[in-house]
């Protein structure tokens, strides 16, 4: 009997986060990131659409336990046949996870997330031009400081979009982030 990838990923996530701990106080700092995203897996969905590349932008902060991130990711998927419309997928999400310290000042972050996939079709079709579906993700990233408050990172995220037939997508990304101390007025608002 084989285990499905989401079950295995969820098990690894839960075990790693139960072992981890956050030493920072809630909302003490902010991390703003931007990365380049690509879809790496292939399944039945990809027989109809070819994935393009996209971008992801996020802002994160230490929470009472762990770290929370809010962000938006955008990619275009191209129809493989003329009668299949291209569409843009805008994923607005909230993630929570636990950061781990690694050697050489690196940081490993495992997270779980939920969000809304807003799919915008490029042209009119026989069904709705806009679709909005709930999605879940499990992911991991490794972050390494490169200069003062800047860091480079690599990430992977396994997403499930709850359409009529579930869409399973694996995203790989690389990017940079900038960390700063949260302004007092913003910290007071967040608390």
Image: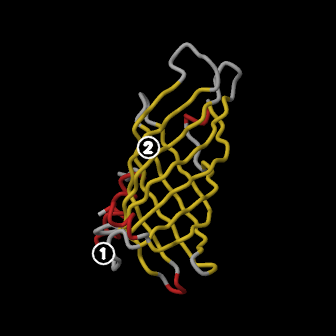
45 left or right, relative to 63:
right
81 left or right, relative to 110:
right
Q: Secondary structure at mark 1?
A: helix
> Foreground residue, 191 or 103?
191
85 left or right, relative to 17:
right
Q: Which mark is residue 160?
A: 2
In the displayed structure, 39 sits above or below 177; it is above
Q: Give me the C-alpha separation between circle 2 and circle 1.
A: 26 Å
Mark 1 burial class by Cα count in 10 Å: few <14, some 14-19, many 20+: few
> In the image, what residue occupies the spot 57% across and 77% down?
149
Residue 63 lies in quadrant: bottom left
In the displayed structure, 47 sits above or below 30; it is above
Q: Which mark is residue 113?
A: none
Q: Give percent across and percent down for residue 51.
A: 64, 41
> Foreground residue, 141 or 169?
141
**Cβ–Cβ below 8 Å for labels 2 and 1?**
no
Mark earlier in primary sequence (2, 1): 1
In the displayed structure, 43 sits above or below 179; it is above
Q: Secondary structure at mark 2?
A: strand
Q: Which mark is residue 19?
A: 1
> In the image, what residue occupies the spot 33% across and 80% down?
23
Mark count: 2
The structure's colour scheme is secondary structure
């Amino acid at each position: 009997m084989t285990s499905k990838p989401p079950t295995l990923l969820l098990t690894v996530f839960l075990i790693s986060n139960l072992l981890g701990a956050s030493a920072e106080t809630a909302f003490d700092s902010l991390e703003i990131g931007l990365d380049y995203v690509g879809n790496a897996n292939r399944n039945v969905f990809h027989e109809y659409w070819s994935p393009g590349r996209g971008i992801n932008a996020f802002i994160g902060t230490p929470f009472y336990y762990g770290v929370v991130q809010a962000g938006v990711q955008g990619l275009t998927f191209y129809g493989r046949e003329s009668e299949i419309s291209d569409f843009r997928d805008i994923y607005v999400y909230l993630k929570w996870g636990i950061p781990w310290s690694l050697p050489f000042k690196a940081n490993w972050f495992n997270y779980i997330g939920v969000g809304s996939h807003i799919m915008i079709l490029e042209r009119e079709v026989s069904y709705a031009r806009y679709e909005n579906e709930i999605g879940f993700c499990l992911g991991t990233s490794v972050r390494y400081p490169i200069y003062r408050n800047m860091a480079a990172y690599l990430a992977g995220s396994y997403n499930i979009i709850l359409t009529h037939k579930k869409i399973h997508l694996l995203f790989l990304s690389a990017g940079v982030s900038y960390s700063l101390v949260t302004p007092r007025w913003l910290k007071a608002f967040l608390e």
